């Protein structure tokens, strides 16, 4: 086994692809928590989206209709969380947990009722990559081109949207009226209220935005990558996204980069599994890699990251 | 709804408001569960006027002003601006009407910059909601120059002193073109110098035609800079006057409803043997930065040692180190010759140190516990309150009732939660517990913060009573008057060091203020100039 067998352009492209659902959710969760609402329901929202997207794509025959359904379903469940934690001032962690459990149960149940069997759905036609450049010739130039083409131009639309969203939202958070108000909501909602900012509306839109992003994350997972739905397929990605959000210090771009780290770990373990008989380490150890990384990140770096001051605290407008 | 309010008995004296009030509140009534916070209250303020709204805590001053600012909806009554009845349902309505309010607890977003805080909610934008930061900054600088309110527009609010933060709050109101400025307890957290600066700013604003309402319970301030005084007690307006027609004594009587001893009577200083000795103590703060640097002090029997200083100069860490709540990095703490440097709070208390913490909600009391349990805290392990780890509820209740009576805690009974008591009664409850176990040394941190004159009087008398029966008291306070009137000796802390020491009564507020802010005259009793940094 050579190092060049492992460090290939495909490794990096695979890292980006594997990172994308986590990254989308991390970006969405950053926005949500900046408004002062904890959203540990990202896992459940992604799962709902993954199921809805696949189901609609299969039944309608249109993958893009599936993407739309994924987003709508995720936002619908996110609005449950918004209603409970903003209007009813419920404990946000409890509400989020409830949605995670609800999502697991609902998708399992609908699997049976819609498709007549548990487990995995039929395959759907996945979305094609945006670009399709011809690979050219041989020689050094061709090698460079293979790297560029694979690492930059091999992705599906939602992957590119994730990159755009991370950059745009980071800029918007610090440069726009929306961003300034969002940050004030998560730090000191009463201060925002006393200067005439509608705390409830601001938080609602942030929770819905996180639902939108979770919807895309679910759609990316099923309609761009796997091509089918399996019960419980999000497999902790929503929680890893929260770790990425914290690692990224509640900045969308930071969350995206942290998610890339997790994606890279995942890509690496997939690659190393292939070589597991050569290097004589059981493949289960590589499988652990992304999760071990999560624990290490949460235990080490995260201790010093400062959450928005008012995150998780319900706000009561008037006495 | 404008139903006929019926015949109104107006018992205001003849000093009534100026003819054209810019803000008027008429017959405001506001009920909270169990409390009538405002009972048919009417006030008015005119442009160019400073109106002081004077009253004890719980008199209903803040409630009234929160109604004017749209934070509370009144049960009855109306708000008039420029003589017209207006509807103020939310702060944004108040802002649109030109009403600005600086709250007692600042409404600032600490991680944001000064400029961001000022423009928040009314941001100048170029296309698509992008904040025009140049315009924002320029407007802040313009306002700041015009009213002499110096601020650093790009500084983060959390890095500013409290006085500076208050300026940002005032600028926030001015940025929104406030014509009426409400200041809620504006001097509670300021140094004497900052108080004077604030008064200059208020004068400047009033000369520009603003109307200013100041909510306060501090008599000397009311006398010093208001044009007119409205006194509230128990939700009602009980009097209206002008500073030239009254004195502090008569205002206090009006405010409390009885005669109040404003000047603390103190017997001569007769220090005995040293009780608490702190030697070369250094302590780190939560960020692991030096907070207390090489501090030495002695508290003797029969004396009050006061520590003056601006909040955040190491006082908190010093107290925590003495109480065993924070580990010192060097130095020793002894009580009656016994080393207690590394004792935990339980052992420190057992050794004879009692502690009135500065934050009575977080550390002084368990708010959800009833009065019995709060009195028992810390003594609950000892007989006769418990045996073999089982509480003797009857004994506890009996003891609680005795202390509640002794310390005049006003409560329906001993089974209500501590959260339901007023601030003054909560503090009395803390004293009942801490002094009730008969300590040798009392550490009192900000013992009267947020209390009204009646409760302050009680706390002060209790502290001096401890001193007079041979206990030692270490008093940490930002209220200079309190430090000066109670202390036999005064230490000034600045940046973790004791920078000056004075005999009580031998120093003025201004002199202390200079040392508190890092100044100091050569030749004065300054101690910190040697600078032997470890």
Image: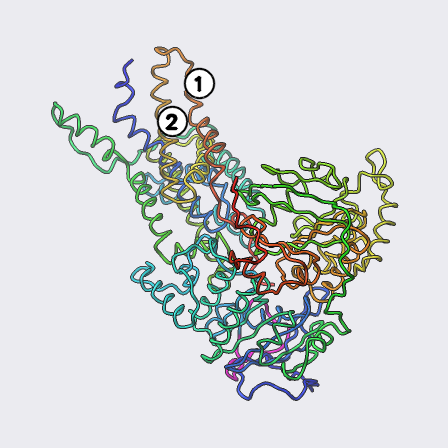
B79 sits to left or right of B481: left
Crowd band around label 1 with a 10 angstrom C-alpha radius: few (<14), some (14–19), many (20+): few
Residue B125 in the image: state x and y as whole percent.
Answer: 33, 63
The one nearer the camera, B369 or B72, is B369
Q: Position of residue A318 (x, y in %)?
A: 58, 63
Q: Chain of mark 1?
A: A
Is residue B79 one of those drawn in magenta?
yes
For residue A165, above or below residue A14: below
Label drawn at residue A266:
2
Would residue A293 be visible to someone looking at this image? yes
Left or right for B272, reference B100: right
Image-based side of A145 in relation to A90, left or right? left
Which quadrant: the N terminus of chain B? Answer: bottom right
- How many numbered tags mark residues here? 2
Q: Nearer the viewer, residue B2 or A147?
A: A147
Do tags 2 and 1 sit on the same chain? yes
Is disc 2 surrounded by few (<14), some (14 to 19) or many (20+) residues within 10 Å?
many
> Dot 1 lies on which element?
helix
| Relative image position of residue A203 (x, y in whole percent) | 47, 53
Q: Report, in whole angstroms, how far the alpha carbon at label 2 lies from the one at label 1.
A: 12 Å
The residue positioned farthest toward the front in the image shown:
B523
State the residue position of label 1.
A284
Q: Which residues are magenta?
A: B71-87
Q: Residue at x 52, y 84 (%)?
A: B83
Q: Earlier in the sequence, mark 2 or mark 1?
A: 2
């Amino acid at each position: 086994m050579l190092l060049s067998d492992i460090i290939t352009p495909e490794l990096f492209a695979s890292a980006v692809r594997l990172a994308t659902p986590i990254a989308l959710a991390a970006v969405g969760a950053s926005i949500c928590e900046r408004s002062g609402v904890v959203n540990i329901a990202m896992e459940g929202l992604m799962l709902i989206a993954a199921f809805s997207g696949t189901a609609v794509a299969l039944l309608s025959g249109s993958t893009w209709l599936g993407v739309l359904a994924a987003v709508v379903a995720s936002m619908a469940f996110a609005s449950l969380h918004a209603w409970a934690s903003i209007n009813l001032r419920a404990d946000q962690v409890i509400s989020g947990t409830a949605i995670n459990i609800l999502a697991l149960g609902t998708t399992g149940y609908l699997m049976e009722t819609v498709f007549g069997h548990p487990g995995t759905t039929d395959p759907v036609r996945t979305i094609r990559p945006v670009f399709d450049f011809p690979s050219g010739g041989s020689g050094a130039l061709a090698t460079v081109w293979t790297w560029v083409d694979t690492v930059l131009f091999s992705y599906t639309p939602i992957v590119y949207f994730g990159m755009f969203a991370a950059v745009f939202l980071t800029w918007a958070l610090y440069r726009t009226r929306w961003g300034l108000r969002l940050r004030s909501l998560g730090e000191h909602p009463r201060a925002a209220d006393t200067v005439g900012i509608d705390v409830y509306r601001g938080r609602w839109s942030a929770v819905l935005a996180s639902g939108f992003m979770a919807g895309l994350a679910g759609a990316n997972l099923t309609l761009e990558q796997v091509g089918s739905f399996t019960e419980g397929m999000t497999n902790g990605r929503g929680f890893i996204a929260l770790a990425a959000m914290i690692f990224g210090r509640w900045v969308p771009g930071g969350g995206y980069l942290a998610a890339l780290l997790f994606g890279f770990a995942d890509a690496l373990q997939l690659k190393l599994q292939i070589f597991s008989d050569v290097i004589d380490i059981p493949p289960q150890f590589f499988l652990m890699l992304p999760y071990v990384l999560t624990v290490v990140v949460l235990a080490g770096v995260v201790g010093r990251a400062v959450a928005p001051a008012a995150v998780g605290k319900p706000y009561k407008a008037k006495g | 709804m404008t139903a006929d309010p019926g015949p109104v008995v107006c018992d205001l004296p003849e000093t009534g408001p100026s003819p054209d009030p810019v803000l008027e509140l008429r017959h405001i009534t506001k009920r909270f569960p169990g409390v009538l916070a405002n009972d048919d209250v009417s006030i008015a303020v005119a442009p160019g006027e400073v109106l002081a709204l004077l009253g004890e805590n719980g008199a209903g001053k803040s409630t009234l002003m929160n109604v004017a600012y749209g934070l509370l909806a009144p049960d009855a009554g109306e708000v008039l601006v420029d003589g017209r009845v207006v509807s103020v349902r939310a702060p944004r309505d108040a802002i649109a009407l030109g009403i600005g309010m600086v709250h007692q607890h600042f409404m600032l977003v600490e991680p944001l910059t000064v400029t961001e805080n000022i423009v928040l909610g009314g941001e100048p934008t170029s296309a698509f909601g992008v904040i025009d930061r140049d315009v924002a900054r320029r407007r802040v600088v313009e306002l700041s120059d015009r009213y002499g309110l110096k601020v650093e527009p790009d500084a983060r609010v959390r890095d500013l002193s409290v006085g500076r933060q208050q300026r940002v709050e005032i600028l926030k109101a001015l940025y929104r073109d406030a014509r009426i400025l409400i200041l809620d307890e504006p001097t509670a957290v300021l140094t004497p110098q900052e108080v004077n600066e604030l008064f200059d700013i208020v004068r400047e604003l009033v000369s520009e035609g603003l109307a200013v309402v100041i909510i306060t319970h501090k008599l000397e301030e009311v006398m010093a800079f208001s044009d007119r005084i409205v006194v509230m007690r128990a939700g009602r307006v009980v009097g209206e006057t002008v500073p030239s027609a009254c004195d502090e004594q008569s205002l206090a009587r009006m405010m409390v409803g009885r005669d109040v001893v404003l000047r603390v009577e103190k017997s001569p200083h007769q220090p005995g043997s040293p009780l608490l000795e702190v030697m070369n103590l250094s302590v780190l703060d939560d960020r692991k930065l030096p907070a207390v640097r090489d501090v030495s002090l002695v508290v003797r029997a029969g004396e009050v040692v006061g520590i003056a200083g601006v909040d955040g100069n190491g006082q908190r860490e010093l107290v925590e180190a003495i109480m065993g709540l924070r580990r010192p990095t060097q130095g020793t703490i002894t009580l009656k010759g016994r080393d207690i440097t590394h004792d935990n709070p339980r052992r420190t208390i057992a050794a004879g140190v009692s502690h009135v913490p500065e934050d009575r909600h977080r550390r002084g009391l368990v708010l959800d516990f009833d009065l019995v349990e709060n009195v028992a805290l810390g003594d609950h392990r000892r007989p006769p309150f418990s045996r073999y780890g089982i509480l003797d509820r009857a004994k506890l209740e009996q003891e609680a009732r005795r202390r509640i009576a002794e310390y005049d805690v006003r409560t329906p009974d001993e089974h209500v939660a501590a959260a339901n008591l007023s601030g003054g009664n909560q503090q009395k409850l803390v004293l009942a517990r801490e002094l009730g176990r008969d300590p040798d040394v009392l550490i009192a941190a900000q013992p009267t913060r947020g209390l009204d004159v009646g409760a302050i009087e009680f706390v002060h008398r209790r502290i001096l009573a401890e001193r007079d029966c041979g206990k030692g008291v270490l008093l940490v306070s930002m209220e200079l008057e309190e430090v000066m009137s109670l202390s036999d000796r005064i230490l000034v802390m600045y940046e973790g060091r004791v920078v000056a020491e004075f005999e009580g009564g031998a120093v003025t507020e201004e002199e202390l203020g200079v040392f508190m802010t890092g100044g100091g005259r050569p030749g004065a009793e300054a101690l910190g100039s040697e600078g032997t940094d470890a």
